Image (tube, helix red, strand yellow):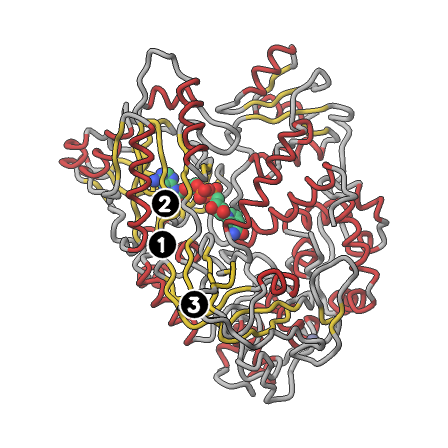
């Protein structure tokens, strides 16, 4: 498999893969892999980078928070970055962190820790400013976004009952708070509300949300506040800042002050004096999981004293003064009733286990993935077996092993992997060296369905109203038969009832009003709205089209970089692998995938049809200037206005290079707030240091 790849290529591939999953997770709220699997990818990348630190770049997923502000909301910079947390997976790693903390502080000082539950939601910044009569009022609610810039979701946050819209002068006084301050906390969706929401979604023909965290993130970012209000979100507060600085001398006082001021704080919080007591807290916290009514995925431990926190500081994406202890995945035993076979966008056939419903950590599990034929062989599972099912990060449950004892007799029926596509009947193929079987029929209805859904998705072509149910109707299928968790029929096959209105993505742009009006439950309003949405998507531009085409490894950012570099579909299509690799962040794997994509006749034809149908196939080409020709820059810390990507784009746009580490060859280090060791190194090597203003000045040429 990866044997022939150099470390650098492996790193490239891993980064692309991780970015792809981060996009699904943070932007679309629809992860495809479990958190444990994502963490494993991340840890592999970390390890490779540690082995060869010169391969670390500032935009590696290990160096930055993975989110991204979504369109439709105003983007607002944070008063101080909203970071991620480093993880510990066992007691040993936790104790190692304790050692590092104490080594980072004078030996004479004692360290206290505050233990809190790690709420599995999304973090939110609430900004309060002076209101009437000496009170404070909620000015703004911001999501974490990419950590530097968040989305302004104030209207939605205002519907959360545990978020005070104002704090009276009396309460401010009691809590010793000024009139303007910032509270940070976690928005969570209680399990009961989650179950109800998914029932409604399924009833409306939509796919259920993967877990409460994704549901909460999706809810807070819908453009309809009345939907948010119905969902019963909660917010638990845990940070208190003023002008981007921690306000009070200890975290314990912060929690108390928040409580006094009327914020909801989590009752399961404890200040302790040593790491043994932390271990104790964790042991008691884990069983709480099943009774809380909301999801937690671990325990967060923070250094109590603000002065000590300041001294310990931050790494690229997380504070050194806090750690998240992650609980092990949850598991349960149930019976394997049957195996269904789903066909994905690329034709990949995935075996899905149909299980006797079982409650695992507050969620009813009825489906689990078996990944592929090799995995079935490895587990050695038969239909009728009892199996151990694991819910890592609570996304797609997975069968870990067969349970074989007195109470759990073995099943008898062999799982037969189909030799033909369960949907279209064409023969399945397996590329040598790959584990997956694929349906290679380009017009397989299952594949077309997945292609359409991907094309229409949020963050891709953003065609609202083109979800599961509508796509199924357009394809002439009475129900959705493929894809998301429970949407498979027992036969795993489509029920085609009508003549399809469309066969390809291009057909979407040929749809007529009368055709839509002929569909079930489609009135004039729905038809017109959908047509308007489809029409609007014509101008989405080259980067989106590239993303929508679903070329392997081409995620949002790569799509953007390619679009800017080539400026038109024509130029991109004609580029050789070598020319493609000249684009920043495009490695040999990505280049290869693009060349392969355009070598397929059907793909070329689709692109041409789309162009003829009026889709915008161009992007503003970035003309690379010469101002910074031959100069190498290193970025560190948080700049006041530009994000890392923006700064990098500007530098590269002027012909400069951005590198991840400081060396004698570095010409300039651009340093922002909380700049770390790179700044020290620059100083010791005598490399010139700029701030953002200095950089912008130089860019003027
Ligand atoms: N499955 C996937 O495809 C996929 C993709 C990307 C990320 N992920 C998952 O997302 C997580 C990584 O993302 P992350 O950067 O948000 O880090 P994180 O979830 O590990 O930790 C940081 C977050 O913890 C939260 N938090 C909860 N309780 C807290 C408390 N008491 N005090 C402070 N913070 C608290 C905050 O929201 C904070 O942003 C991992 O669990 C990872 O597995 C999964
Ligand atoms: Zn097929």
Q: CA distance from mark 2 to mark 1?
A: 8 Å
Disc 2 crowd rating (10 Å Cα; few below 14, some 14-19, many 20+) is many
**Residue 334: mark:** 3
Q: CA distance from mark 3 to mark 1?
A: 40 Å
In this view, the residue in front, 127 or 106, is 106
Query: Quadrant location of ligand 2?
Result: bottom right
Q: Is residue 33 left or right of residue 279?
A: right
Asked whether the viewer can see residue 75, the reply is no
State yes or no: discs 2 and 1 in contact (Cβ < 8 Å): yes
Q: Which label's residue is closer to the chain start, 2 or 1?
A: 2
Location of residue 424 by image quarter = bottom right
Residue at the spot of label 1: 156
Q: Is 538 situated above or below 556?
A: below
User: Residue 251's spot in the image, x, y percent?
Assistant: 29, 29
**Residue 141: mark:** 2
Location of residue 306 by image quarter = top left
User: Residue 180's spot in the image, x, y percent?
Assistant: 28, 33
**Residue 482: mark:** none
What residue appears at the point 61 percent right and 65 percent down from the top-left corner?
376
């Amino acid at each position: 498999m990866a044997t022939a790849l150099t470390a650098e290529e492996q790193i490239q591939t891993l980064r692309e893969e991780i970015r792809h999953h981060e996009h699904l997770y943070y932007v679309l709220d629809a992860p495809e892999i479990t958190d444990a699997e994502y963490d494993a990818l991340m840890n592999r990348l970390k390890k490779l980078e540690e082995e060869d630190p010169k391969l670390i770049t500032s935009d590696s997923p290990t160096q930055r928070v993975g989110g991204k502000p979504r369109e439709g909301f105003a983007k607002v910079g944070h008063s101080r970055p909203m970071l991620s947390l480093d993880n510990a997976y066992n007691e040993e790693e936790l104790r190692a962190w304790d050692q590092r903390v104490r080594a980072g502080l004078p030996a004479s000082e004692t360290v206290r820790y505050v233990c809190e539950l790690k709420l599995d939601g999304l973090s939110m910044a609430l900004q309060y400013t002076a209101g009437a009569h000496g009170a404070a009022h909620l000015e703004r609610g911001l999501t974490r976004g990419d950590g530097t810039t968040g989305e302004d979701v104030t209207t939605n946050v205002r519907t959360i009952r545990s978020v005070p819209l104002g704090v009276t002068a009396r309460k401010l006084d009691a809590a010793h708070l000024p009139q303007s301050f910032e509270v940070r906390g976690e928005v969570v969706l209680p399990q009961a509300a989650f179950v109800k929401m998914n029932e409604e979604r399924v009833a409306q023909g939509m796919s259920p949300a993967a877990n409460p965290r994704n549901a909460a993130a999706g809810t807070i970012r819908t453009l309809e506040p009345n939907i948010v209000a119905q969902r019963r979100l909660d917010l638990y507060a845990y940070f208190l800042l003023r002008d981007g600085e921690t306000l009070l001398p200890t975290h314990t006082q912060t929690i108390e002050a928040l409580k006094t001021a009327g914020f909801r704080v989590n009752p399961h919080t404890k200040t302790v004096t040593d790491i043994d007591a932390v271990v104790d807290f964790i042991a008691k916290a884990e069983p709480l999981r099943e009774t809380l009514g909301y999801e937690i995925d671990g325990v967060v431990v923070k250094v109590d004293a603000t002065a000590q926190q300041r001294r310990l500081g931050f790494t690229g994406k997380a504070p050194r003064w806090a750690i998240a202890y992650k609980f092990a995945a949850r598991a349960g035993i149930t019976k394997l009733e049957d195996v269904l076979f789903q066909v994905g966008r690329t034709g990949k056939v995935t075996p899905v286990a149909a299980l006797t419903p079982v409650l695992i950590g507050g969620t009813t599990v009825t489906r689990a993935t078996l990944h592929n034929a090799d995995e079935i062989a490895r587990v050695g599972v038969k239909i009728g077996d009892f199996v151990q099912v694991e819910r890592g990060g609570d996304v797609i449950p997975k069968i870990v092993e067969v349970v074989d004892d007195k109470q759990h007799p073995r099943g008898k029926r062999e799982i037969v992997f189909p030799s033909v596509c369960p949907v279209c009947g064409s023969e399945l193929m397996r590329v040598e060296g790959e584990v997956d079987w694929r349906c290679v029929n380009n017009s397989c209805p299952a594949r077309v369905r997945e292609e359409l859904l991907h094309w229409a998705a949020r963050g891709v072509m953003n065609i609202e109203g083109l979800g599961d149910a509508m796509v199924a109707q357009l394809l002439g299928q009475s129900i959705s038969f493929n894809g998301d968790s429970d949407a498979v029929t027992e036969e795993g096959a489509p029920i085609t009832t009508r003549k399809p209105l469309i066969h390809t993505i291009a057909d979407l742009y040929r749809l007529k009003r009368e055709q839509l009006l002929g569909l079930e439950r489609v009135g004039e309003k729905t038809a017109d709205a959908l047509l308007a949405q489809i029409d609007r998507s014509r101008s989405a531009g080259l980067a989106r089209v590239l993303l929508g085409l679903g070329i392997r490894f081409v995620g949002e950012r790569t799509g953007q970089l390619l679009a800017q570099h080539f400026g038109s579909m024509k130029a991109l299509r004609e580029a050789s692998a070598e020319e493609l690799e000249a684009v920043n962040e495009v490695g040999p794997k990505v280049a290869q995938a693009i060349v392969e994509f355009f070598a397929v006749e059907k793909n070329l034809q689709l692109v041409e049809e789309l162009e003829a149908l009026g889709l915008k196939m161009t992007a503003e080409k970035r003309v690379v200037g010469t101002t910074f020709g031959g100069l190498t820059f290193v970025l560190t810390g948080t700049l006041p206005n530009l994000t890392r990507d923006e700064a990098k784009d500007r530098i590269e746009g002027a012909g400069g290079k951005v590198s991840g580490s400081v060396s004698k060859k570095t010409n300039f280090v651009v340093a922002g707030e909380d700049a770390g060791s790179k700044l020290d190194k620059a100083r010791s090597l005598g490399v010139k240091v700029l701030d953002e203003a200095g950089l912008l000045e130089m860019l003027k040429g």
